[in-house]
Amino acid sequence: MSPPDSPDAFPAENLLGRETSPYLLQHKGNPVHWRAWGEAAFAEARARDVPVLLSVGYAACHWCHVMEHESFENEATAGLMNQLFVNVKVDREERPDIDTIYMSALHMMGEQGGWPLTMFLTPEGKPFWGGTYFPPDARYGRPGFPDVLRGISQAWKTKREQVSENVRVLVDALHQRQVSQPGSRIETGMLDRIADHLVGAFDPVLGGLRGAPKFPQCSIVEQLWRAWLRTGRRTGNAQLRHTVTVTLDRMSQGGIYDHLGGGFARYSTDEQWLAPHFEKMLYDNAQMVSVLTLIWQDTKSPLYAARVAETVAWLEREMIAEHGCFASTLDADSEGEEGKFYVWTEAEIDALLGGEAAFFKEQYDVKAGGNWEGHTILNRSHKMLLGDEAHEARLARARAILFAERARRIPPARDDKVLADWNGLMIAGLARAGFAFERPDWIALAASAFDAVMTHLRAPEGAADAGRLRHSYRQGRAQHAAMLDDYAALALAAVLLHEVTGETAYLARARELVGDADTWYWDAAAGGYFFTAADAPGLITRTKSAHDNATPSGNGLLAQALARLYFLTGDTAYRDRAEATIGAFSGELGKNFFPLSTLLIAADLLAKPLQVVIVGAPDEPRTSALIRAVAGAGSLPNLVLQLVPPAAALPVSHPAHGKGLVGGLPAAYVCEGPVCSAPVTKAEALAQDLRSR
């Protein structure tokens, strides 16, 4: 047998069949000798003295599939990869800690990010060159992948000093990125000025940030909505409100929305919201459910209500995974073609709908030549409002016929792995929507998923991290140390479940999750939370950021959870930690406030909460009436709701401490800062009070 450090000791085969990630398993049949990320792969690179070729993607990624078919399934290209490199494949959704580091390195090289991410590393895991998608031969202004492979290998062999200098510069820069920029307290005036700047970056006609591609940007949309409620309504700055509603209207009626099956695609490739990148992600839809609900509470838009209900129906129908948790994504491709499952021809519509076809085609932009690559993406972009009840019922009957026909097609693949943070986002969205729309079944769905995640995404007994969260779960295996976002999203979800159900077990869960985050992720030297735990398997740097990406930042989410815990418990340690988290990054506002919306939302909540305490027996009809009055009182983004049984006592530091039933009747108390209203026992009076605020 060859010694462990001998090149001959390593298997000349693809090892991805041992993994559970659907993305990695998609590549298990490639002739490339793929390895999963781990010390064994880097030991092999050291023994062979070759670089590591790191390829990062995800199961629903269209260009990842393209590069696989063009290069990774090509015997000649695979032979070059196997000869010149140790090849490591990573699922970015399963290992966002790895993806974050090497995507940051790519940006530092002046390259635009995206997936597949292709990076070349030293055997110590340090980056020295990279890109995204590479074609099989030179095109699109990109070199051919075989030429890249030969060039990088030659540089490794003959220009090692230059490679080492690239490594030094990149790694130094990566270390600098973990240093947060502290600043002063974020005042309301600053939030308003930021909102005014953000409005100027939005398209006033089409919505969304100007240009293409267009992403949902839910945290920015919520930030603008809060500014409208906070000052825009009072000052008459209707542009804030218009920016939010035109963005949501366009998304809800555009091709980015699946008008037959519900749910939003990842983004639109054009500025019209017409042609999506057809993948559907759990996290996008979680955020859309939340923001549509928040704005519906004020506008009562039937369009927003419909899109929330349809998206939740899609979730229940297509995205329930093991144990009632939620799956991650639906692919963009089916039968090797992007969007094939979703698009139509005019002839198909005519054949299926007969006499109703003309009416449907006018409503959904169906025409002879199609509106996208010879086919039609269904959309109602020229109809920003829904029709009357009879009109919409007629369209619903037609959609049902098309939906049934579409179900006969080969569907996109589903990535059914369960991710703790994405589940937390959807649980939070369902809790908010279930409360606002008075849908206890949605709250029950959220509660069931939360309990399942907290049961199954745990490190097993005997593990070094026994009992703590894991990031990913599939086929009975909880894997990979949890990251900050996992704790943050689930802590906020637990707090919101507590608020809408009154169940103290969720409050205890939230405190437990925040406690673990403090223990394992807090930066005691500079404030804020690191992305990875102090005892997580070592990477070349430990990142720390409050920037939103496709998902809200963990620091921003946790600051929101901490603020809510402070208002609910009166424990000032939560307030202090929330303030310290926000302060650790507030110095970045002068440089770039666009990616900080989730953190700014936390600052707004911390500065001006609206605490509503309802004291009464949970099964008392008068208690239920008061709760419904809160749900129907309009858009209250800083609402912190506390449902208190008559025998329970609020913390001494709570502004409503000592307040209870009035004449034996359930009562509500509305508190802003240290001052609470007189008790209210009638639902309509409570609703009027809240609407006036």
Image (tube, rainbow, N blue to C red):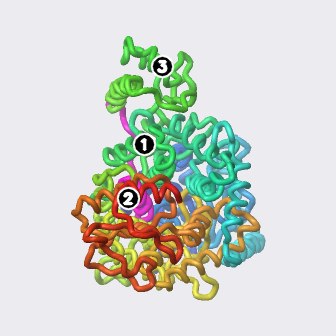
Q: In the structure shown, which secondary structural element does the residue marked by tag 2 occupy?
A: helix
Task: State whether residue 278 is above or below residue 388.
Answer: below
Task: Give the residue type that dot 3 points to.
Answer: Lys
Task: State whether residue 645 is above or below residue 322.
Answer: below
Which mark lies nearer to you, 1 or 3? Answer: 1
Q: Label 1, on which residue?
A: 305
Q: In the structure shown, which secondary structural element does the residue marked by tag 1 occupy?
A: helix
Residues at marks 1 and 3, CA–CA distance in whole angstroms: 24 Å
Between 570 and 400, which is closer to the camera in this rendering? 570
Q: Which residues are magenta?
A: 408-435
For residue 323, side relative to residue 199 (left or right) = left
Furthest-front residue in this view: 663
Judge whether residue 116 can be spotted in this image: no
Q: Which mark is residue 361?
A: 3
Q: Residues within 10 Å of mark 3 (few under 14, many from 20)?
A: some
Q: Residues within 10 Å of mark 2 (few under 14, many from 20)?
A: many
Q: Is residue 400 magenta?
A: no
The residue at 44%/38% (across/down) is: 302
Which mark lies nearer to you, 2 or 3? Answer: 2
Task: Give the residue type that dot 1 points to.
Answer: Ala
Residue 351, how many percent across, how many down? 38, 15
Judge whether residue 219 can be spotted in this image: yes
Residues at marks 2 and 3, CA–CA distance in whole angstroms: 37 Å
For residue 220, side relative to residue 36 (left or right) = right
Between 542 and 636, which is closer to the camera in this rendering? 636
Residues at marks 1 and 2, CA–CA distance in whole angstroms: 15 Å
The residue at 53%/49% (across/down) is: 64
